[in-house]
Amino acid sequence: MCPHCKMELAELWFRELKGNMGKRCVYFCLKCRSRLGISHRKGLTMGL
């Protein structure tokens, strides 16, 4: 459930951000396009 528009979520949109500190994914609500969260995945420079 989206905390912004209160709609039930069947799927999410995400955008992958790449940089020096590894990969990050930003997750969005499909209905209102509000940001729901950011995940972090370590890159080669940070170790696996």
Image (spheres, rainbow, N blue to C red):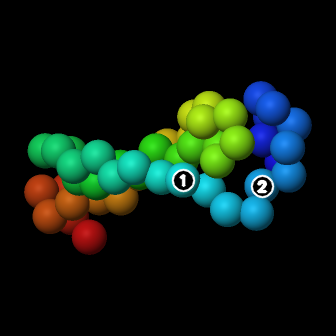
The three-letter amino acid code for the residue at tag 1 is Trp
Image spot of residue 23 (x, y percent) = 28, 54
Q: Quadrant of the C terminus?
A: bottom left
Which residue lies at the image location 65% right of the left edge and 44% below the top edge? Answer: 29
Q: Residue furthest front?
A: 31
Give the amino acid at mark 2.
Leu
Up-down relation of residue 5 to residue 18 (above or below): above
Q: Which mark is residue 13?
A: 1
23 with respect to 3 (left or right): left
How many tags in the picture? 2
For the residues labelled 1 and 2, the Cα–Cα distance comes to 10 Å
Q: Which mark is residue 34?
A: none
Between residue 46 and residue 18, name the one nearer to us.
18
Check the image and report above or below for 30 versus 45.
above
Could you tell whether 37 is left or right of 4 in the image?
A: left
Instruction: Please tell me which residue is depicted at 62% across the width and 56% down the height of the picture.
Output: 12
Which residue in the protein does label 2 denote?
Answer: 9
Helix or strand or loop: what does disc 2 sit on?
A: loop
The residue shown at (48%, 52%) is 14
Q: Secondary structure at mark 1?
A: strand
In the orientation shown, which residue stands out farthest toward the bottom?
A: 48
Q: Looking at the picture, how far across and down is residue 26, in whole percent?
A: 46, 44
Crowd tier of the residue under label 2, counting other residues whose Cα lies within 10 Å: few below 14, some 14–19, many 20 or above: few
- What residue is at 70 percent from the left and 42 percent from the top? 31
